[in-house]
Each structure stands twice: as structure tokens, then as C-alpha cells.
Image (tube, rainbow, N blue to C red):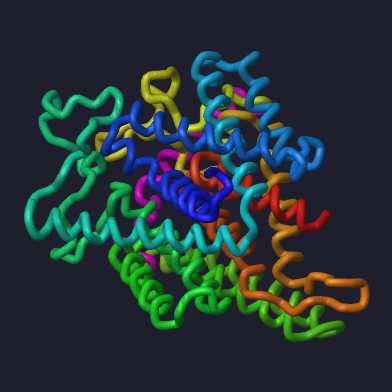
Amino acid sequence: MIESRRFRSVFAAFAIFSMFAGDFWRYLLGWWGFGTIVLAVLGISIVVLVRHRARWHVERLPYPLLAFLALATLSILWSFYPGATAIGALSTWVTVVIGVAVAVWFSWDELLRALGHAMRWLLGLSFLFEFIVSAFIRHPVLPLVPSFGVDYDALEKIPKLLYWSRDLLFEGGKIQGIVGNSSLLGFIALIALIVFGVQVAAGSVHRAWGGFWVLVAIAAVGCTRSATIFVAIAVILAVLVMVLLLRRFTGGAHAAVYGVAAALVALGAVLVTTMSTQLLAVLGKSSDLTGRLDIWDAVIGLAQQRPVAGWGWISFWIPWVEPFDTLVFKSGVRQLHAHNAWLDVWLQLGVIGLVIFGALVVSTLVRSWQFAVERPLVSPLAPAPHTAVSLLPLLLLVALLVQSVAESRLPIEYGFVLLTVIAVKSKASQS
């Protein structure tokens, strides 16, 4: 049964849905329910890796990925909170095992189809949920299962960040969807735009059906209005244009394309440096980046106390573990990550972890770029034509990298699963 086409299709879509909708499962079923779902996906992933052990070997996995896993595990030895680090390392191992299984078991075409199904469910259920809240419940809704350490009855006023939905659909406010977070829903909409766009370009869905879901994703971006997503869209479009130009031209024209790209990057850096206040105003952001500067200051101050090897890997911050129990509060809510993936890695694994994680990201980005730009060889004298699907890993990775500046999801949950999948598959393709 496990090898049937239907089971494989359902498993891939459900696994992708769940890695993006972790907060949805936790709000609905609590951590124990979410843990049960993760264990089920992990169990199937282990079976897949055992059955298809001829398709993969540990020594063929990306070395920076293995080094990062090793460092996260070894950090138990010097961790300020060894018990929490053991839990964090275990969760990271689970994430990587699932990512490797998905990479081994599915082709890029199958992954594209599974991503399409998952994104439709995520966006469709999010709009349905917000409509039910605004049309019938007509007041903000809290999670069915409170987060660890939160007692709603003990609070004089419930912070807005704790609500699952704030009943803003009909008011034109930022909706949060089933994931309970407008920034996360906006990122899901961005991934959906990439996936639906590639599907339309590849002809893997009916053009009208694909166009409809592109419009749904655009509507979700508009209803969340995340500044990070607007920046990510601009960067992704620039990367897409560059790749398409490089595909079209050969030889000396490549140097001209890279030269123009370098000039645009330099111009962008100058604009960000000299006109940051004006740019933030255009994006609807305050000068402190919605409180992120205070969070980053607190994280940097803590990281500087243990700059080389960090405080110990923990993944998401466990809210009752020192020093995270009092490190950062925002709008009355204890924060569970640094809102910057690179600062989080530095804080937890120091400069050593930052170098290894950077090597993983850069090597994966280079291979994804080559996969998107270069024509695959059917034989030494017969290169195959470019495909739309070969754009998918690069565009997904660029989206994750832009988000990593404002959120810490890249080394956690869906971010690390996607990074693992792209890293493993891109190295296998290169080999």
C-alpha cells in the first residue's frame, strides 16, 4: 500500500501541509496532538528510507547538513540548558529525516504537485476559517488549546498576538488564517504564488484553474500585507528575470547579465543604506521594524556572551527555560525566536554554527542556481531543453532566504525541511 500512487500523493501533500501548518495543529489539538502527527509522518519517512536505502547513502548527503546536525547534537555537552538542547536536537533530527525521505521518494514534478495540493488546502481553509469567524462568530477567536504556560483567565487583557483569528476579514485588517499569524500566512501565499506560477508555466494544471489559484494567492498577500513578502516578491522577480535571460543568451551575454545584476545589487544596497526610513514608510513599517530591533539587540547582547560555540541548540525557544523565560517580550507575549534565522543560529551555535549553516545555504543556492540556468545533458552531445520545474528549488530557496532576515523559520520546521529537500536533491542531481 505504501508504494501506491494514491498513498504517495496523499502522504506528500499531508506532510507538506503539516510542516507549514504546525501552528494550526497546535492550536487545534495541542502539542500532544501535533506530536502524534509528526510521529506518524516520521514513521512513514523511516519506512521509506529503509525500503529505498539503495537510493541514498549518508556519505552522499550534503556535508554541511551532516556537520550542522553533528554540531547541534554535540552542543549538549556545553549547553547552558542541556535537557532543552537534547529536545531541540531531536526535533532537528526528525525534521532532517522527513526532509531526506521526501527528497529520496519524490521527483521534482511530484513535489510540485504535492506542494500545489498543500498550498490550496492552506489558503482555502484559511479564507474559509476567517469567513466563518467574521460572518458567524463575529468576535476574535482564541486557540482551542492554549500555548504552554498561558492561562487566559489569569490575564487582565489578552494580547492580540495570542488570538487565533482577530475577526478582521470584513474590516480589511490583516487576516491570520488557520496558522494564526499574518506573516506566516503571507509567506504561505508567497510559496503558493511560486508553486502555482510554475505549474501554469509547466502546463501541469489547466491554465484557468491555475490562474484562479494564482489570484487566490495574490488576494492572500493583499490580506496579510507583510512588508517582508513584498520585498521577497521583488527579489524573486529579479532572480526570475535574470535566470530567464541567462537561459536565452549564451557566451559573452552571460557576463553582461551578471554585470547588470551586480550593479542593481549595489544600487539596492545604497538605497537601503541612505533611504532606509523612506523605504520603511513605503512598506508600512515603523523605524524599529515592528519591534524587531529591540529583539535583535537583546539576542546580540546574549550571543556576545558565548560568541564561539553559542548557548546550545534549542530550535524554537522553550519559554520556561532560562535565559529565554525573560529574554524578550513583545506586546505582552514572550517571544519564541529571534525573528532572524542568522541571529538565532549565532545565539545557539555561535560563529562555528553560523559558518556551517552558511556553507549549507550557499552550497545549496549555488547548486539550485546551476539547476535552473544550465540545460541538463541527455547525452554529452544532446542537452535537454530548459523546464519550468527546474526553477522551483531556486525560487523556493530565495523566498526562504529573504524571510530569514525577518523570521527564524529557515533552521526550524518547514524552513529546514525545505532546505533539506533542496540540498539533498540538488546534490543528487549534480552527482
Answer above or below: position of 179 versus 322: below
Q: Where is residue 256 in the image (x, y as percent from the top left)?
A: 78, 82
Answer above or below: position of 301 versus 254: above
Q: Residue furthest front?
A: 1
Answer whether residue 377 is visible to the viewer in this image: yes
Q: Which of 103 and 413 is in front in this view?
A: 103
Q: Is residue 427 magenta?
A: no
In which quadrant of the rendered view does residue 330 lie? top left
Q: Position of residue 419 (x, y in %)?
A: 61, 48
Question: Which residue is at a point 69% across and 57% down the rendered structure image?
Answer: 365
Answer whether residue 62 is visible to the viewer in this image: no
Q: Which of 100 and 422 is in front in this view?
A: 100
Question: Which residue is at a point 41% across and 35% down the rendered structure image?
Answer: 37
Q: Residue furthest right?
A: 380
In the rendered structure, which segment of residues is drawn in magenta?
282-308
Q: Position of residue 390 (x, y in %)?
A: 66, 68
Judge left or right: residue 208 versus residue 223: right
Q: Does the magenta stretch include residue 291?
A: yes
In which quadrant of the rendered view does residue 345 lie? top right
Answer above or below: position of 296 versus 426: above
Q: Where is residue 87 in the image (x, y as percent from the top left)?
A: 51, 21
Look at the image and tell me in which quarter the C terminus lies: bottom right
Question: Which residue is at a point 26% across and 38% down the rendered structure image?
Answer: 28
Number of numbered discs on residues: 0
Q: Nearer the viewer, residue 316 or 114?
A: 114
Question: Which residue is at a point 41% across and 68% down the rendered structure image?
Answer: 278
In which quadrant of the rendered view does residue 125 lie? bottom left
